[in-house]
Amino acid sequence: MSARQTLRCLASATGIPKTTLMRHLAAGVFRRATTRVKPKLTDVHMARRFAFALAHVERAFGTLPQYLKLL
């Protein structure tokens, strides 16, 4: 059934009223399902992301008043 994208489509495809489907959904008889394909990180991309993160890390801290802004 490719028409299962919305409750309205599911209702028309199965012949079950939309309100009945909504009640069963709220009662937990069935649940919404979403699929999301996460893109895979290649080794090159992962190394580039790691290098970017390292470039933005401050390794040495100076004196504390440098980092405090007094009002």
Image: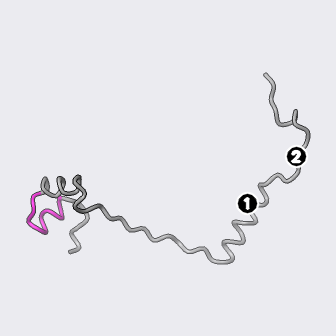
Q: Is residue 14 left or right of residue 28?
A: left
* Foreground disc of the pair 2, 1: 2
Contact flag, marks 2 and 1 (Cβ < 8 Å): no
Residue carrying label 2: 61
Q: What colouring does the structure picture have?
A: one colour
**Residue beneath the point at 67% across and 71% down:** 46
| Numbered label attached to residue 33 | none
Query: Quick one: SS at disc 2?
Result: loop
Q: Is residue 30 left or right of residue 61?
A: left
Badge 1 local density, few (<14 within 10 Å), some, or many (20+)? few
Q: Quadrant of the C terminus?
A: top right
Q: Nearer the viewer, residue 29 or 55?
A: 29
User: Which residue of the protein is positioned furthest toward the right in this rendering?
Assistant: 63
Q: Report the magenta stretch's main SS.
A: helix
Q: CA distance from mark 2 to mark 1?
A: 17 Å
Three-letter code, disc 2: Phe
**Residue beneath the point at 13% across and 68% down:** 13
**Residue beneath the point at 91% across and 39% down:** 63
**Residue beneath the point at 36% across and 65% down:** 34
Query: Quick one: SS at disc 1?
Result: helix
Q: Nearer the viewer, residue 39 or 22?
A: 22
**Which quadrant would residue 41 be assigned to in this image?**
bottom right
Q: Nearer the viewer, residue 18 or 31?
A: 31
| Magenta-span inclusion, residue 2 | no
The magenta-colored residue range is: 8-17
Residue carrying label 1: 53
User: Which residue of the protein is positioned furthest toward the top in this rendering?
Assistant: 71
Badge 2 local density, few (<14 within 10 Å), some, or many (20+)? few
Mark 2 or 1, nearer chain start:
1
Q: Nearer the viewer, residue 57 or 29?
A: 29
